[in-house]
């Protein structure tokens, strides 16, 4: 993984939504950069000039992000085309995106599984590392946690209110004493990745920091530094529950290590090392297999108890930063900088069963609904794709907007989908709701095991 990081305030020029022409730049971003986010609230990033957009307003024709296209010197369609032509996909292996298209599955893109509910402008998710996009997590259909500058913020879609859960701008230290915990804590942690499940929040940092907080307790429960290696960044964290009910999490690091922590004992339980930096890890539903992807086109499936390789995964052309298991434990997916998501079947891993291609760039986040009916994948910006698993990924809904994507998350009950959008003017949280399923569809799903 590259060691580049963003300024948390603004994306670099090639990722911003301006520069199409002078009129677009002036209208679209309010002219003066320093003034575009001038209405500062307690978190220092609110811009109240652009109101939220509700579902009823969107049905009446309002742009879901509140972009005033009728006042701009460019149409939405023209700007979309310009973005498609000019957006720079980051590649570690040159031309990987050009070479990955030959095996891609043709899909029908006119499906609609989740409908727009609201675009909330008062809460904005930010990104510190351009390759790491797992910074949005829903714990219910109304509750979502996200990184916003130096704070982890809780947002309620019921009350449209936010509250700060964790602030890492200053000194952070554990209020509980556990063996192995760094009681001195950390100062000015830069959060690279985040995970929230039930009442546990784990934040990973650029220097290998891990900060664990129980949402139903005051203070920090546990602090640890995974490594003092110069290449220490925590790339991903996954929280899971063992068959016995114990809460664990895995941390994937740039020092080529994957570490498993037992949160009942607050102890490191396993440490596996691999030949290259690990960017993402996901555990199979039965807890027996780990998907390992990182700074190598080939991913790996390994035994979760021993760390020994079961098989290599061949097909991607660049480095991978995302993975996820289907709830059935038979299929899983990987996302790569070659602009593709590959779906694999553990019963035949000689090749992937589906190759799904993005529009702009790398596939940086993958999520399945808990019932297994849908899989969502996020590109670095502008597009989230929702695939119908029942159609063997042949049908999809394409959610189209403008801005960098900080993360995506289905709620555990599958009713909501949240998308973090990072842009200096139009940064926000998009919320979508699952559409009603007909009785016939429910019967078909039951027959297929969904």
Image (cartoon, grey):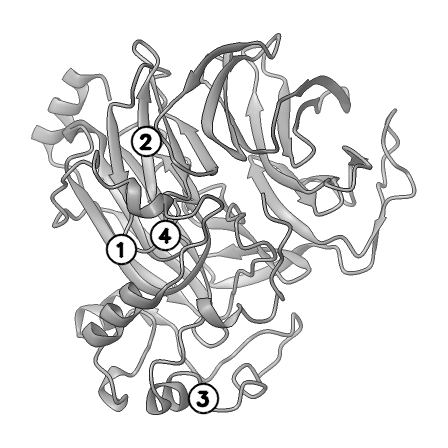
Q: How far apart are marks 1 and 2 (CA)?
A: 20 Å
Relative to 391, 361 lies left or right: right
User: With respect to residue 331, does 341 lie above or below?
Assistant: below
Q: Earlier in the sequence, mark 3 or mark 4?
A: 3
The answer to which of 267 and 231 lies nearer the viewer is: 231
Q: How far apart are marks 1 and 4 (CA)?
A: 15 Å
Q: Earlier in the sequence, mark 2 or mark 3?
A: 3
The answer to which of 274 and 236 lies nearer the viewer is: 274
Question: Which quadrant of the figure has residue 351?
Answer: top left
Q: Distance between the residues labelled 2 and 3?
A: 40 Å
Q: Which of marks 1 and 2 is nearer the N terminus?
A: 2
Q: Earlier in the sequence, mark 1 or mark 3?
A: 3
* Dot 2 alpha-carbon crowd within 10 angstroms: few under 14, some 14 to 19, many 20 or more: many
* Dot 3 alpha-carbon crowd within 10 angstroms: few under 14, some 14 to 19, many 20 or more: some
Question: Which residue was labeled with disc 2?
Answer: 342
Question: Which residue was labeled with disc 4?
Answer: 361
Question: Which residue was labeled with disc 3?
Answer: 30
Residue ID at (64%, 50%): 3
* Dot 1 alpha-carbon crowd within 10 angstroms: few under 14, some 14 to 19, many 20 or more: some
Which element is circle 4 on? loop
- Residue farthest along the front direction in this orientation: 94
Residue 286, position in %: x, y? 46, 12
Q: Earlier in the sequence, mark 2 or mark 4?
A: 2
Which element is circle 1 on? strand
């Amino acid at each position: 993984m590259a060691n580049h990081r963003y300024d948390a305030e603004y994306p670099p020029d090639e990722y911003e939504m301006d520069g199409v022409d002078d009129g677009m730049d002036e209208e679209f971003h309010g002219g003066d950069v320093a003034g575009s986010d001038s209405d500062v609230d307690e978190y220092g990033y609110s811009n109240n000039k652009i109101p939220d957009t509700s579902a009823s307003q969107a049905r009446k024709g309002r742009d879901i992000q509140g972009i005033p296209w009728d006042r701009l010197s460019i149409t939405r369609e023209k700007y979309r085309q310009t973005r498609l032509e000019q957006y720079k996909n980051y590649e570690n292996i040159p031309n990987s995106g050009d070479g990955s298209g030959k095996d891609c599955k043709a899909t029908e893109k006119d499906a609609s599984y989740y409908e727009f509910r609201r675009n909330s402008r008062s809460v904005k998710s930010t990104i510190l590392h351009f390759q790491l996009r797992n910074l949005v997590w829903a714990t219910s259909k109304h509750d979502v946690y996200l990184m916003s500058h130096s704070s982890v913020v809780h947002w309620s879609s019921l009350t449209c209110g936010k509250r700060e859960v964790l602030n890492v701008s200053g000194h952070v230290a554990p209020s509980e004493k556990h063996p192995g915990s760094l009681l001195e804590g950390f100062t000015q942690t830069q959060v690279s990745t985040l995970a929230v499940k039930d009442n546990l929040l784990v934040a990973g940092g650029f220097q290998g920091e891990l900060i664990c907080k129980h949402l139903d307790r005051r203070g920090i429960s546990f602090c640890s530094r995974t490594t003092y290696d110069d290449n220490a960044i925590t790339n991903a964290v996954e929280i899971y529950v063992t068959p016995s009910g114990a809460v664990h999490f895995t941390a994937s690091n740039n020092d080529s290590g994957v570490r498993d922590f037992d949160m009942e004992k607050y102890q490191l339980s396993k440490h596996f090392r691999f030949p290259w930096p690990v960017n993402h890890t996901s555990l199979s539903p039965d807890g027996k297999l780990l998907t390992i992807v990182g700074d190598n086109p080939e991913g790996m499936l390994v035994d979760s108890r021993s760390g020994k390789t079961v098989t290599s995964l061949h097909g991607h052309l660049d480095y991978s930063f995302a993975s996820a298991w289907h709830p059935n434990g038979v299929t899983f997916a990987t996302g790569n900088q070659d602009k593709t998501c590959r779906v694999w079947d553990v019963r035949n891993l000689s090749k992937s069963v589906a190759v799904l291609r993005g529009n702009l760039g790398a596939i940086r986040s993958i999520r399945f609904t808990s019932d297994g009916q849908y899989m969502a994948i996020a590109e670095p910006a502008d597009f989230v794709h929702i695939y119908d698993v029942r159609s063997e990924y042949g049908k999809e809904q394409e959610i189209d907007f403008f801005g960098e994507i900080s993360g995506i998350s289905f709620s555990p009950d599958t009713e909501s989908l949240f998308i973090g959008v990072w842009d200096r003017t139009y940064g926000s949280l998009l919320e979508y709701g699952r559409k009603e399923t007909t009785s016939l569809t429910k019967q078909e799903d039951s027959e297929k095991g969904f």
